[in-house]
Image: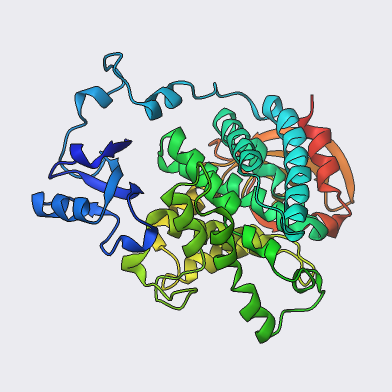
Amino acid sequence: MLITLPVSELTPGMYVDSVTKQHEGINSIKIKTSGLVRDNSIIKRLVSEGVLELLIDFTKGDAAIPAKYKPQSTPKTSNSQQKVKKTPIAISIEQEFAKATVNYDQHGRKLQSLYGDLTSGLSVNIKVLDEIACEIVSSVFRNANAMTILTRIKDKHSYNWRHMINCAIFAAVFAKYLGYEQAVVQELAMGALLHDLGQAKLPQGIFSKPTKVTNNELAAIKKHVAQGLGLVKGEKGITPLMLDMIVNHHERLDGSGYPRGLQAEKLSRPARIMAIVDVYDAMTADRMHQDGDEPINALRYLLANKHLFDGELVQRFIKCLGVHPVGTIVKLTNERLALVLEGNILNPIKPKIKLFYNAKHNHHVTPKDIDLSDHTQELKILASVKPLDYQINLSRLLKEHLLN
């Protein structure tokens, strides 16, 4: 169980997941931001570093959950707990998909407008971004699959704002899976929404060209981190956790990242989560200079590069999304195509699917829901396929099969 505590309530035996609030900027933390609190000297050091609040993982460590933070506690309840109590009731993917589709399109239009304002020199509208992050998190808590499926729809002409939305969705879905409180999930989603905002302050021709960027253009692109920080630092509602995600999402465990070349011990869990989410969406999205890769290849890349990305988090990210994430079209052993609708945490290669197409004779068939984890089910997934390989319009397909 993950609970946010003020540093005054920290005791030896607790396991710190991450620092969520502190006096100074993110550069002030010179110690590991996760680990077991072994004695009072560690607590004193955290206080001296300006730490105000921490996220504690009570599934690790030896300390018991303080009585006032237990679910059966008295009415004296923290704000973050009150938010958790208001968590939306889970509903079916079909019920959530209709709302998620409308919201996703609205988010895209709002971000496109906001992005244009920033490019023109206007200041950032934090309220709009906060409302988008809030709607994404609410949707994810009602049904994590509905919004996630929409990340599979590609449009290279709107990559910049789609990437912002998609990263917020993936961050929210992953944080919920990891057990974070809804208030912290909201912060992570907002950080993901903000992480590339600085790109709006760069020459836009770099991002619209159909060929790969040059070394000089790459050097310019790297400045988006500082630009993003400048846009939001000091704005009301922007937390140290969000700033951490903006500044450190391109850092890598071996110190090969940018802008500061930080190594593993200096990188917080939120920064590590953001790095994984950012690379995954960038690899699977269509951009002006590249067609998106299949999710399984992006997951393999993350898994193969343990010197760059947190291996434990990558493993958990794969379990969260599944080997074939929702919204992926897969080919089955019976020469049929199916749409992945729901992952399987216990067995990621056996998700719930909707069979809809005869790949041998190239025609649609009567849709059929199948749970591949059913012990009576002999069908298996052979591979993921690209919708366009079979002239399938994914957006139309989703609406046909998921809208009531």
Instruction: Depth check: give the residue in front, 383 or 163.
Output: 163
> Going 75% across and 53% down the picture, which residue do you hit?
117
Rendered position, 352 above or below 162:
above
Q: Position of residue 38 (x, y in %)?
A: 12, 52
Q: Position of residue 333 (x, y in %)?
A: 69, 52
Q: Is residue 2 left or right of residue 150?
A: left
Q: Is residue 125 left or right of residue 191?
A: right
> Going 30% across and 44% down the picture, which residue do you hit?
54
Q: Which image quarter: residue 103?
A: top right
Q: Position of residue 18 (x, y in %)?
A: 33, 50
Q: Is residue 149 left or right of residue 373?
A: right
Q: Position of residue 46 (x, y in %)?
A: 21, 53
Rendered position, 142 above or below 328:
above
> Going 75% across and 35% down the picture, which residue do you hit?
101
Instruction: Depth check: give the residue in front, 131 or 50.
Output: 50
Q: Quadrant of the C terminus?
A: top right
**Among all residues in the image, which is located at the extreme top?**
75
How many numbered badges does the structure rendering display?
A: 0
Rendered position, 164 above or below 375:
below
Q: Which image quarter: residue 201?
A: bottom right
Q: Quadrant of the N terminus?
A: top left
Residue 347 seen in this snapshot = no
Residue 337 seen in this snapshot = yes
